[in-house]
Amino acid sequence: PLITQSARLLEMVARYGSIRRAAERVNAAPSAVNRQILNLEAELGTLLFERVPRGMRLTEAGKLLVDQIRAWQRDYERARASVEGLKGRNGELVRIGVMECLAADFLPRAFGELQQEHPDATMRAIVDGTAEIASQLLSNEIDLAVAFNMPRDTGLKIVHEIRVELGAVMPPSHRLAREREVPLSALLEYPLVLADGTLSIRPVVDAMLERTRRPAAEAVVTNSIIMLKSMVMRGAGVGVLTSVDVYSEVKAGQLHFAPIAGARVFELLSVSVRDTKALNPNAVRMAEIVSSAMEKLTQPIPGNQAVNGIEPTIA
C-alpha cells in the first residue's frame, strides 16, 4: 500500500485512543504497535501522543500528522477508484459500516437484494460501534454507515432515519411478558442485563434508569449485543434494548419485547454518508435498499404482542 504501516497504526491509535484497541484491530501485539509509535516519534524528534490514564491523547504535532494521514487516505481511495474505473470495475464495491444488531440478518438481506439487481456487486462490511463507524465514514474508509445515534456535529449527511423506542426484553415465558407495557418500577424488581458504556445505547438506558432514583441490580454488563441477548434467553435477567436489536429473535419466538411504561425513550437509527456525490451507483442503490428495509422495521414484529413504538422520519 502507498500509506505505510506506521502511518496506518498512528491513525488507528488516534481514532481509538488506545494502543490495545488499535492492536486488536490489526491482530498485532500491543507492544508491537507501541514500538511502531515510539519509532515514529524518534524519527520525527517529537512526541505524537500524551500517555494519560485513560489512554492516548494526541499532541499538537500528532494532530497535524494524523490530519495529513487522513487526507492521504482520502486521496488514495479516490485515486484507487479512478484506477478501478479505467479497468471497467468502478461502481461494484460497496463499503458499509453497521451495528452488530444488523449484521446477522438485516445487512445480508439488503445485500442479497442488491446482488439480485447487480450480480457483479461486491461489499466490504465493517461491524463496529457508532463512534468507530462515524470515524471510518469521515476518513473515507466506508461509503455508508447504518448506526444508532450518529454524531450531528461532524458534517456527515443523514439520508434516512427512524426513531426506535427502547423496551424491556425477556423470554416469552417471563412474567413481565404478559404486560403490554413494563413499568420502570417493575423492571427494577429483576436483575438487569445491560450494554456497557462503549455502546451508544448505554447513556440512553442510564438516563432512563436515573429517573427512578433506585439502584439497579446489574447481573451482566457486556459490550456485545449478541451476548446480551443470549444471556437474557438463558434467564440471567431482563434486558433493555431497542426492538431493532431483537427483531429477529422476537420474530422467531425466542424473546419478547415490551415498551417501558411512562418512559418514552428513543434511539435514532440512521443511514449516513460523507458525500452523496462521491457514492458509486451500487452504494447509492444500497442506501436506498437499506432505507426501505429500515421502514419495514417500523412495523409491529410478527409474533410480538407489544406495541413496538417505532416512529419513522425522513431526513
Image (cartoon, grey):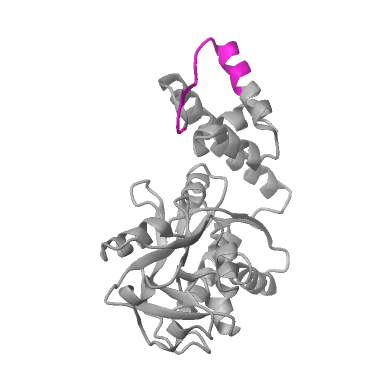
Inspect this view and state whether residue 63 appears.
yes
- Magenta stretch: residue 38 in it? yes
Left or right of 9 on screen, residue 183: left
Vertical placement of 79 versus 91: above or below? above
Q: Residue 169: image x %, image y %?
A: 47, 75
Judging depth in this view, the residue of 184 and 268 nearest the camera is 184
Of 198 and 286, nearer the camera is: 198
Q: Quadrant of residue 30?
A: top right
Q: Quadrant of residue 50?
A: top left
The structure residue drawn at horizontal position 69% and vertical position 63%, both measured from the top left corner, is 121
**For the N terminus, which image quadrant?**
top right
Please give the count of numbered marks on the rendered protein: 0
Please tell me which residue is depicted at 65% across the width and 69% down the height of the picture.
Answer: 108
On screen, 248 above or below 15?
below
Which sits in the foreground, 262 or 156?
262
Is residue 142 depicted above or below 282 in this figure?
above
Residue 4 visible in this rendered orientation of the protein: no
The range drawn in magenta is 37-54
